[in-house]
Image (cartoon, helix red, strand yellow):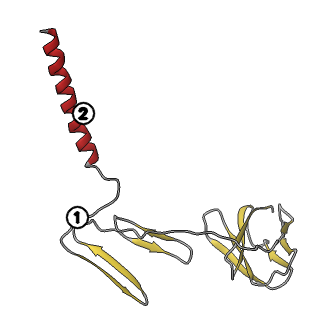
Amino acid sequence: MKNSSCIVSSIFFSFLFSLFSLLAAAQSLTPNVVASQGDYVTSAGGSLSWTLGEISGETYSSATNFLTQGFQQPDTVYVTAVSNPVEQTISVYPNPVIDNLMINFSVSGENYFAEVFDMTGRMLTRKYISSAQTKISFSPFSEGIYLLTISNAETHITYSFKIHKLK
């Protein structure tokens, strides 16, 4: 009697394990939309992809950022590669700054631009750099912490500096 109950419980647990295995295999982690209608249209100005049955999603974009919502998000691949980088040393001083911030390049500063952002992400000034030494006036800004980015217009390599502004 004891043997038969062990066999029955063993069969029962085997059945439950098989059932749970099948249910677990039926799950998918990739976002899919099952819909009867949809389309993808592309033109020189952009592209549009849509399906019926998906809740409304919005897309926001700016010059440097792209945000989409919903299941139909584009596959984005970022590849960062630097081949034969030019050794560039940038010095930014004085930090903390009161009036003028100096930017010195060890090589030519051509094709660079500097942007100053406040802590909310608002761009306060943008200056194109055309020499090995550049001055940015911080006197109109109030006391606080600012972000200075120096970017190469051709290679899009960006250097970031945290700048403390005093009165």
Q: Position of residue 54 (x, y in %)?
A: 26, 66
What residue is rendered at 82% in x and 71% in y?
87
Residue placed most toward the observer, 21 or 103:
21
Q: Quadrant of the C terminus?
A: bottom right
Q: CA distance from mark 1 to mark 2?
A: 29 Å
Residue placed most toward the observer, 140 or 153:
153
Q: Which residue is mark 2?
A: 17
> What's the amino acid at mark 2?
Phe
What secondary structure is marked by label 1?
loop
Q: Which mark is residue 34?
A: 1
Q: Position of residue 103 (x, y in %)?
A: 83, 73
Closer to the chain start, of discs 1 and 2, is 2
Q: Position of residue 79 (x, y in %)?
A: 58, 69
Q: Quadrant of residue 41?
A: bottom left
Residue placed most toward the observer, 54 or 123:
54
Mark toward the viewer: 1 or 2: 2
Q: How many marks?
A: 2
